Amino acid sequence: MILLIVCIKYKPAYEVTLAGEILGYVKDKNYIETKLNKFINDTNNNIAFREISENPVYALKFINKDKKTEEKSVMLAIENATTTTYRNFAVTADGEQKAVVHSETEAEDIINQIKEGLDGTVDLKLGITEIYTTNDETVSEAEAMNTLNELKTVKVAAYQEEKAQKEKEEKRKAAAAKAKSFATTTTVAASGSISGISLAIPVNGTISSRFGVRSSSRSSAHTGLDIAASAGTGVRAIAPGTITYAGYKGSYGNLVIVSHGNGIESYYAHCSAIYVSVGQNIDSNTTISAVGSTGNSTGPHLHLEIRVNGTPVNPQDYLY
């Protein structure tokens, strides 16, 4: 009688527990095991492998005949308890991971596209690394291309800036070498003195405009002496002194000012290059600049001014 009552009111089912937690009841434990094995061994969609820390435990129970078994929810709970490891590919630049994509083919395609137009001038040090992660955080090929193109733009700009700086430095060195060569092959003798200071000719050339002359190219009388010479010709100081200005100054263009003491200053304008800096002590053999045509100038020449207590005087009273 008892057995009959049990058979009428109850039905057999397997209680499934995992790590001590009851997940639910299933009709057939083999069904769950088959589904679990299929899930664990599925390596589609870049899955490298799956693992579960503990296997589910099954216990035969009798449950109310009206209670439905819970195959779907039990299986979902088991799947959520597994750890999935994905196999993806990272595109690297300078050894740093920049983007993660699903396949090696995608990574190679991205690198080939990024390299287009570089012509070997800029090396981004691109590479591919196989990575294994427990989350499948990959990006599309388009997103990866955007990331790498941004890096490419920055690298190319840096390369071009570095190239421009090198070219500028090479030109400066060439001009300095030319000026140094001029200074060592030309003998400059003292031509006069002012306030007891011996003066030397700063550059050999042809006088193209004298002190006090007025012209259409200037708004007032000429405050110096213009000596025409080839661009790049070295310019020396007329006497020892200290550099008080070395830079660009309006109509003067590139300008060097030397203080010789006793209120005596000399100005060297329109230079194509400057080889000294403020505070530097120099002598009359020091090449301080190179003849040019910067500022308000119609051609390569040195504009030489001599000032006494701030007032321009005629350089030809002492030189040339």
Image (tube, grey):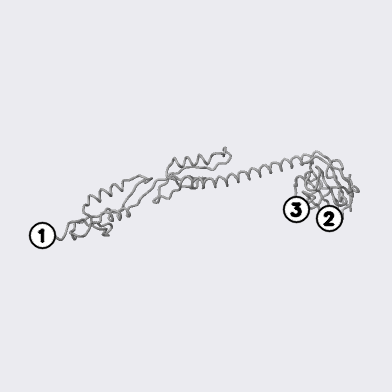
Q: Report the mark closest to the observer, 3 or 2.
A: 3
Which residue is tagged 3? 278
Which residue is tagged 1? 4
- Which numbered disc flags the more N-terminal residue, 3 or 2? 2
Residue found farthest to the left: 1
84 to the left or right of 1? right
Q: Nearer the viewer, residue 46 or 315?
A: 46
Disc 3 to disc 1, C-alpha distance: 113 Å
25 to the left or right of 151? left
Place residue 23 in its image quadrant: bottom left
Which residue is tagged 2? 261
Residue 121 lies, in percent from the top left, at 58, 39
Residue found farthest to the front: 66
92 to the left or right of 209? left
Query: Identity of the amino acid at label 3?
Result: Val
**SS of the residue at dot 1?**
helix
* Quarter of the figure with the C terminus: top right
Q: Nearer the viewer, residue 220 or 159?
A: 220
- Which numbered disc flags the more N-terminal residue, 3 or 1? 1
Query: Identity of the amino acid at label 1?
Result: Leu
